[in-house]
Image: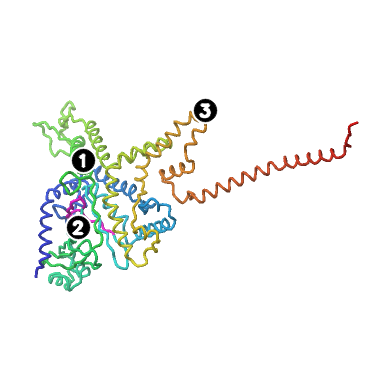
């Protein structure tokens, strides 16, 4: 029997599906040439089926792989902590208990994120590739009881999204398929429709059933209640077979992290690099096809034969004997057709299009420092400043729209696991317990490299003045300056001294200097004392002379 709520969700899903029909044709066009294994938007391929029949040039495919690696290394590198937690109130920034607590929370968060079960690294890379190919990506962050965090990159073909009044994605339908066994394990045999039960009973491992996971704002939520029916977001799993709800619940925070590369006015889905240069990708493929045909023509050209000749059984294989191929004077009676086609110009044109595609995927920009390893520190900072300025508009959006949602969801999950976090210090409780995220990824350092350029440029400009008046450098805080440059350049914090240790080291150094000065002055003082004592003794030996 159909459920009214299920019927309502399915009708809303059909409307969202109808709205994005044009997008699916565009994504199919892109996937066929850029990411063939994801080309399941308009047509559904069987497992193992040939998918690259439209690919004649691999430039875009390789560029997408590099694009995913670039974003991974700039935003969420595996070998470092790419964000930390801070408190918004400036007066509490140096509060030691709060700093210790937030550092410990950050470490535990990264430990959960990097566990083998979580599978964060591989899934986020899939998301970045979806961003490069289609301009939109989505990740589901799940809380698996007893196991912890679990991340899942969602195929864009499964996602149907809607924005709220602020332009934020707060409504997601994910359409996916399960076989009977998977459905029963996920939702329980008592909750699934009869046809799915039959497939399970018959051990049918091939028949798939379609489901919809609908997550939307809970408009009737009572914030004072803690049960799932009053959480911020409602969650429904609907079996399209039988139009039946097989699972419902709620989320305190939005479980899907959806991000766009760039959006056009009045469009919900994004447009990525592949969409922007799709005409060039198509052109490169066509040009490659043309050059292949030209190459075939040059290697295996059409032959021109003399009409009245007695040439029989003409052979084109190597070392073949063709009688009658020349006349009495030894002139060839068979000649290849010469089209006069010139390939060099086509190669140059194709290379220029390939360079344009690489530019769109940020590859040329990322290689600036790699191709110039012998630059000075100032030149490297200038290059980094240029890269940061060019990366900032698009990559900054990923920090706010994607990573911000991911971290909010993670903190909510880990904060509700008993014993997962240390006890919050009283100072932070008194401040409301609200924390902020500060990104420390390589991208963030690139965006801050302008500060490093300003510091080094100022020092360089003051150097000639310092030859006249060395005190000109007194304007700088020599304790803060090297620390700021170290942070901009990404020097690991473990090799930097804390303020207390730095102060203790300076005090010890000053004490050593004073002790050395005392030791150096000791022989002089001893000699002076000796001379003074000798002079006093001499004065006592001389008799006093009274006046006459």
- SS type, badge 2: loop
What mark, if any, has residue 277 been given in the picture?
A: 1
Nearer-N-terminus badge (2/1): 2
In space, the residues marked 2 and 1 are separated at their CA atoms by: 29 Å
- SS type, badge 1: loop
- Which segment did they paint magenta? 151-168
Q: Which image quadrant: the N terminus?
A: bottom left
- Kindly identify which residue carries mark 2: 47
- The reply to whether callout 1 and callout 3 are in contact (CB within 8 Å) is no
Q: Residue at x 17, y 74 (%)?
A: 190
User: Could one spot residue 321 in this view of the protein?
Assistant: no
- SS type, badge 3: loop
In space, the residues marked 2 and 3 are separated at their CA atoms by: 77 Å
Residues packed near mark 3 inside 10 Å, few (<14), some (14 to 19) or many (20 plus): few
Q: Is residue 191 above or below residue 216?
A: below
Q: Is residue 443 above or below residue 468?
A: below
Residue toward you, 431 or 229:
431
User: Quick check: is 142 in the magenta stretch?
Assistant: no
Residues packed near mark 2 inside 10 Å, few (<14), some (14 to 19) or many (20 plus): few
């Amino acid at each position: 029997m159909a459920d009214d709520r299920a019927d309502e969700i399915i009708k809303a899903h059909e409307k969202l599906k109808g709205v994005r029909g044009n997008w699916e044709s565009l994504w199919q066009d892109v996937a066929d040439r850029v990411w063939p294994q994801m080309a399941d938007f308009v047509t559904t391929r069987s497992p193992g089926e040939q998918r690259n029949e439209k690919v004649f040039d691999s430039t875009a495919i390789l560029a997408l792989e590099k694009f995913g690696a670039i974003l991974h290394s700039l935003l969420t590198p595996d070998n470092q902590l790419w964000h930390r937690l801070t408190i918004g109130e400036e007066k509490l920034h140096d509060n030691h208990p709060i700093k210790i607590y937030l550092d410990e929370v950050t470490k535990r968060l990264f430990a959960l994120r990097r566990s083998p079960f979580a599978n964060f690294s591989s899934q986020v890379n899939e998301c970045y590739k979806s961003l490069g190919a289609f301009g939109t990506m989505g990740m589901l962050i799940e809380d698996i009881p007893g196991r912890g965090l679990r991340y899942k990159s969602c195929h864009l073909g499964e996602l149907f999204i809607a924005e709220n009044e602020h332009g934020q994605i707060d409504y997601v339908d994910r359409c996916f398929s399960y076989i009977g066994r998977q459905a029963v394990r996920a939702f329980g045999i008592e909750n699934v429709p009869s046809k799915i039960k039959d497939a399970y009973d018959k051990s049918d491992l091939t028949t798939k059933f379609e489901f919809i996971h609908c997550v939307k704002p809970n408009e009737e939520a009572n914030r004072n209640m803690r049960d799932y029916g009053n959480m911020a977001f409602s969650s429904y799993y609907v079996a399209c077979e039988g139009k039946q709800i097989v699972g419902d619940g709620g989320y305190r925070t939005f479980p899907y992290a959806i991000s766009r590369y760039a959006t056009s006015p009045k469009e919900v889905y994004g447009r990525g690099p592949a969409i922007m240069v799709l005409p060039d990708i198509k052109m490169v493929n066509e040009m490659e096809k043309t050059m292949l045909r030209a190459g075939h023509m040059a290697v295996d050209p059409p032959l021109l034969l003399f009409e009245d000749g007695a040439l029989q059984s003409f052979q084109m294989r190597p070392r073949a004997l063709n009688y009658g191929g020349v006349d009495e004077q030894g002139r060839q009676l068979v000649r290849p057709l010469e089209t006069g086609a010139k390939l060099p110009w086509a190669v140059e044109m194709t290379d220029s299009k390939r360079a344009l595609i690489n530019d769109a995927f940020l590859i040329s920009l990322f290689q600036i420092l790699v191709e110039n390893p012998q630059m000075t520190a100032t030149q490297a900072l200038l290059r980094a400043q240029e890269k940061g300025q060019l990366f900032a508009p698009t990559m900054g959006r990923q920090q706010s729209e994607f990573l911000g949602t991911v971290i909010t969801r993670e903190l909510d999950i880990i904060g509700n696991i008993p014993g997962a976090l240390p006890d919050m210090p009283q100072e932070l409780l008194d401040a409301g317990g609200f924390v902020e995220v500060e990104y420390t990824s390589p991208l963030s350092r690139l965006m801050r490299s302008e500060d490093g350029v300003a510091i080094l440029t100022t020092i360089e400009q003051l150097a000639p003045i310092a030859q006249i008046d060395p005190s000109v450098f007194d304007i700088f805080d020599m304790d803060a300056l090297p620390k700021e440059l170290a942070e901009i350049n990404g020097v690991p914090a473990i090799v930097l001294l804390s303020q207390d240790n730095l102060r203790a080291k300076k005090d010890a150094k000053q004490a050593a200097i004073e002790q050395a000065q005392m030791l150096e002055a000791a022989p002089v003082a001893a000699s002076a004392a000796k001379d003074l004592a000798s002079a006093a003794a001499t004065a006592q030996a001389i008799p006093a002379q009274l006046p006459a």
